[in-house]
Image (cartoon, rainbow, N blue to C red):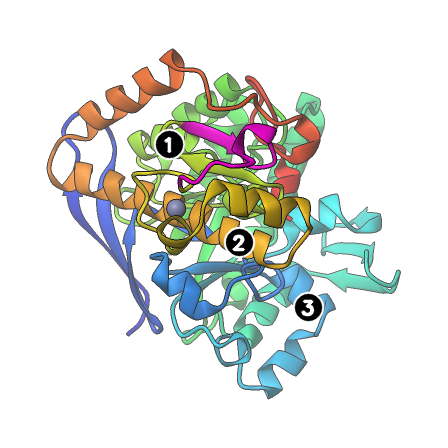
Amino acid sequence: MAFQFEILKKDLFSKARLGRIETEHGSFSTPAFLPVGTQGTVKSLTPEELVEVGVEAILGNAYHLYLRPGHGTIERLGGLHTFIHWDRPILTDSGGYQIFSLAKLRKISEDGVTFQSHIDGSLHFLTPEKVVEIQRTLGSDIAMVLDECIPYPSPYEYTKASTSLTTRWAKKSLEQKQETDPALFAIVQGGMYQDLREQSAQALVKMDFQGYAIGGVSVGEPKSLMRSVLEWTTPFLPENVPRYLMGVGTPEDILDAVMFGIDLFDCVLPTRNARNGMLFTSIGKMSIKQAQYAEDERPIDETCACYTCRHYSRAYLRHLYLANEILSPRLNTIHNLYYYMNFIKITQEAIREGRLLDFYKSRGLYFNGRPPLSPSPSRGEGEGGGDKAISCAIRL
Ligand SMILES: [Zn+2]
């Protein structure tokens, strides 16, 4: 079935909506959280394990797969779904962000961007048209246009020129799109400037894409600014297509954005934190390496029904982490992704049953009123810390 988006229920007290996205590889409910499978794998888990924790769609990255193993190789091996043994929907990020954060010797021109591979230093030139072609070759279900990810902070004039270039690239991307291609989403930029966000959204909406993403957030800006970007941008986005907030975020960020009418999210937070021994629980975050868990027989979260919590103690998980065992990131990732998917499921149910506001208030009370189980991790561990939005680097 070709790409379709249907709104099943709208919340009365916010802009939140419950929806369903149909693709050729099946459908999934929104709001949705897509775990990050940059290299064609959600790190450490098999597709069967992803399904078991409730994952319905994943994110891949065109930049990484283009560089290695190469989109041509993947096409010859049957396309991305076959290659990675995942028969459900895949959204591919264009690589715009990665080019601007990972690649060396970047040079932007009207036609595209020249850069050096972060893997072997080889020189590449990617155009908006080529990026559409790469995602077609991969066989994604949802493709993203090439954009320039604007760093934070950036001066007004630079942001204005960059946003305008992203808009011209979006037009070229759309012109390149063929009937049987993946659904193509545009990316609203505009930095942290209200007028530029509005202009970006308005110009892109005129082009009639199949979905709209908000990019250029989670780049180290204060959380209040991320919320402002949502306030400035979402009123200009059409109701009847999906809206995607790229690279976000914590469960509370996601819930906030759902209230603004955002449907799709992706973030490496649950998977990367898992590998760092940082676990999400119903009463706060837990650092499994702490000595207090050395002989703790309880599961990570006594209210959690995931495979890890059904079978393993905090003491064992701490031991695996400290011994640097391969099973440690696997069991931790199973738990953290289950936590995220369950959080999304509860959010969907709250919208369906008309009690999202109560759920939001209860979460807000909890987030603001109770200390986490353990101190927040340092910024180096990818949490962004305090009042800062999570660094965009976690999208890698
Ligand atoms: Zn669990």
Magenta region = 284-298
Residue linked to disc 2:
36
Q: Which residue lies at the image location 25% right of the left edge and 21% below the top edge?
A: 362
First along the sequence among labels 3 and 2: 2
First along the sequence among labels 1 and 2: 2
Q: Tell which of 189 and 289 is nearer to you.
A: 289
Is 273 drawn above or below residue 358 in the view shown?
Answer: below
Q: CA distance from mark 1 to mark 3?
A: 31 Å
Q: CA distance from mark 1 to mark 2?
A: 19 Å
Count of residue discs: 3
Q: Which amino acid type is marked by label 2?
A: Val
Is 198 drawn above or below residue 70 in the view shown?
Answer: above
Q: Which amino acid type is marked by label 1?
A: Ala
Q: Which residue lies at the image location 65% right of the left edge and 49% below the top edge?
A: 396
Is 192 drawn above or below residue 69 in the view shown?
Answer: above
User: Is residue 268 in view?
Assistant: no
Q: Which mark is residue 257?
A: 1
Residue linked to disc 3:
66
Q: Which residue lies at the image location 66% right of the left edge and 40% below the top edge?
A: 393
Q: Tell which of 95 and 312 is nearer to you.
A: 312
Q: Which amino acid type is marked by label 3?
A: Tyr
Can you name the residue that lies furthest to the front here? 295
Q: Position of residue 80 (x, y in %)?
A: 53, 75
